[in-house]
Image (spheres, grey):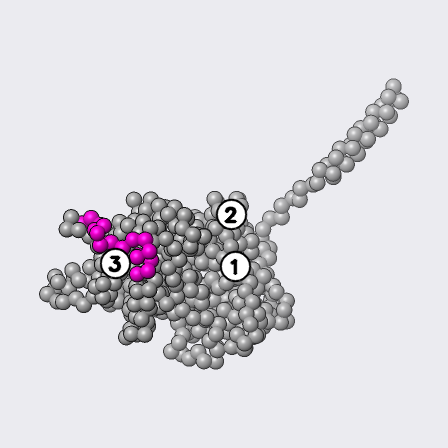
């Protein structure tokens, strides 16, 4: 039922002049879903308070509650068509009253880690793009059918929302930057193996895939105590995101996965000067897939000791700096980082090898990221001691990856198994630091164990050989005829 509701919402938004892409569909669905989620959350908290004989004070004032403006109902539980807003009246209320009211939460909240602050920040970053109040009414009616009360309902909703984010990536253009394949994320988390009590950070949070999957991983890692549950809610997951839409999607994704007030900040991570990062700012675990191929301005580069316009290289410097001593990281980066010959890349590889133990490099095949033609690797490292030996695993599949043939967890099972012992195989090998050229620190993933495939000859070569054999056969036949 939920899946069909999502599809119906997309079909309705497709007809609205204000929504022109999958990105718009997700954004507009997100703010309406968020307000419905808040209504269900308020009802759950009110019911819990009543059971314990307490009084619950709502977050949202009555006139701006879901049941007042979006879904006023009759005593029979049906939409009250006499009081429900529609058409221009609905869009005017949303644009001129509802959004301004919700924006004020940001300045009035007691702190950035509260749901009130998240409400204010979300509605400061977006606007209602649905131009027709009749379209908006149809979407609201459908969203009202969705429920966020039970764990099972939230789990199904989070799964569907992830599918919408994936569709954005498959749609091409800039949608792909929000979606990292979940099998890859889950595999990275298995290798890094965070524990409850450790802080987990993603400075390029996007749709919060790493934080959501880390939350799921820790939920199932042990029998949780009450303290553990509070720790996961309040003081485990942290992120930063520069782009407004990604920030909103990331917040919504974490909420649907069960984190009530995500510690995600809307800011440019690279605007932070590395010299200003203190011990209190550091994290135990970094999981991230920073943007590929971006170019940063000169003033941003001044925040880093190694100056470069390459966004991913600046992010990698940030991640190394913000890790605690002994901290662990799993970072996706373009495979060209391993061998680029520019001074900044060489200096960054030298820094990584001298300050961290780069223990594992996962070399991924082309097509891992749908819609992106770049090849990538995953760097796994621990901060605090220099690298002695790098273990490589090259993922070689017997099929080409693409939209209809995506990467799966099963594809990565051998990597996870072999990584525990750093075993050598046809697809894995080790490189000792003493064998790395200190002048270039080239870390290219050159597999010495892979069997060389016999090169296929071109049609021209085959025809030439056939012609030569025919000629030779004719000569032999002539000699035989002469002897006769």
Q: Residue 68 placed where, x, y %?
A: 22, 59
- The residue lying at 51 percent from left, 55 percent from top is 173
Q: Earlier in the sequence, mark 2 or mark 3?
A: 3
Residue holding disc 3: 69
How packed mark 2 is, by other alpha carbons closer than 10 Å (few <14, some 14-19, many 20 or more), is some
Q: Is residue 144 magenta?
A: no
Q: Earlier in the sequence, mark 1 or mark 2?
A: 1
Residue holding disc 1: 377
Tell me if residue 118 can be seen: no
Single out the mark in the foreground, 3 or 1: 3
Q: CA distance from mark 1 to mark 2?
A: 15 Å
Residue holding disc 2: 401
Tell me if residue 207 can be seen: yes
How packed mark 1 is, by other alpha carbons closer than 10 Å (few <14, some 14-19, many 20 or more), is many
Q: Are marks 3 and 1 in contact (CB under 8 Å)?
A: no
What segment carries the magenta color?
77-93
Q: Earlier in the sequence, mark 3 or mark 1?
A: 3
What is the secondary structure assignment of the residue under circle 2?
loop
What is the secondary structure assignment of the residue under circle 3?
helix
Q: Quadrant of the C terminus?
A: top right
């Amino acid at each position: 039922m939920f899946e069909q509701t999502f599809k119906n919402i997309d079909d309705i938004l497709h007809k609205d002049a204000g929504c022109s892409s999958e990105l718009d569909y997700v954004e507009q669905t997100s703010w309406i879903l968020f307000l419905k989620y808040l209504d269900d959350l308020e009802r759950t908290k009110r019911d819990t308070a009543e059971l314990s004989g307490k009084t619950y004070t709502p977050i949202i004032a009555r006139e701006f509650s879901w049941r007042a403006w979006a879904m006023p109902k009759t005593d029979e539980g049906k939409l009250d068509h006499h009081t429900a807003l529609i058409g221009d009246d609905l869009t005017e209320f949303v644009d001129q009253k509802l959004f301004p009211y919700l924006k004020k939460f940001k300045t009035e909240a007691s702190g950035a880690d509260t749901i009130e602050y998240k409400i204010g920040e979300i509605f400061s970053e977006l606007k209602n793009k649905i131009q027709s109040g009749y379209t908006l009414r149809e979407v609201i009616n459908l969203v009202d059918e969705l429920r966020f009360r039970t764990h099972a309902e939230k789990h199904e909703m989070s799964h569907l929302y992830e599918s919408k984010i994936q569709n954005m990536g498959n749609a091409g253009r800039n949608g792909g930057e929000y979606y990292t394949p979940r099998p890859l994320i889950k595999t990275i988390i298995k290798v890094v193996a965070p524990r409850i009590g450790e802080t987990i950070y993603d400075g390029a949070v996007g749709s919060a895939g790493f934080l959501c999957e880390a939350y799921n991983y820790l939920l199932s890692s042990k029998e949780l105590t009450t303290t553990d549950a509070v720790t996961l809610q309040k003081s485990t997951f942290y992120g930063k995101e520069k782009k407004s839409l990604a920030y909103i999607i990331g917040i919504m994704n974490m909420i649907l996965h069960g984190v009530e007030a995500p510690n995600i900040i809307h800011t440019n991570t690279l605007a932070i000067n590395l010299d200003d990062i203190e011990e209190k700012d550091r994290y135990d675990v970094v999981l991230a897939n920073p943007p590929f191929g971006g170019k940063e301005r000169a003033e941003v580069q001044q925040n880093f000791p190694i100056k470069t316009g390459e966004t991913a290289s600046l992010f990698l410097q940030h991640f190394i700096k913000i890790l605690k001593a002994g901290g662990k990281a799993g970072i996706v980066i373009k495979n060209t980082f391993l061998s680029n010959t520019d001074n900044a890349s060489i200096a960054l590889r030298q820094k990584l090898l001298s300050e961290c133990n780069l223990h594992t490099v996962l070399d991924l095949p082309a097509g891992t990221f749908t819609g992106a033609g770049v090849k990538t690797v995953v760097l796994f490292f621990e901060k605090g001691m220099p690298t002695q030996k790098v273990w490589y695993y090259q993922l070689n599949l017997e099929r080409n990856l693409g939209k209809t043939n995506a990467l799966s967890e099963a594809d990565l099972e051998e990597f996870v198994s072999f990584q525990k012992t750093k075993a050598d195989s046809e697809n894995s090998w080790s490189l000792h630091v003493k064998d790395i050229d200190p002048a270039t620190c080239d870390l290219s993933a050159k597999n010495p164990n892979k069997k060389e495939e016999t090169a296929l000859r071109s049609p021209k070569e085959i025809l030439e050989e056939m012609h030569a054999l025919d000629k030779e056969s004719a000569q032999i036949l002539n000699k035989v005829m002469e002897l006769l």
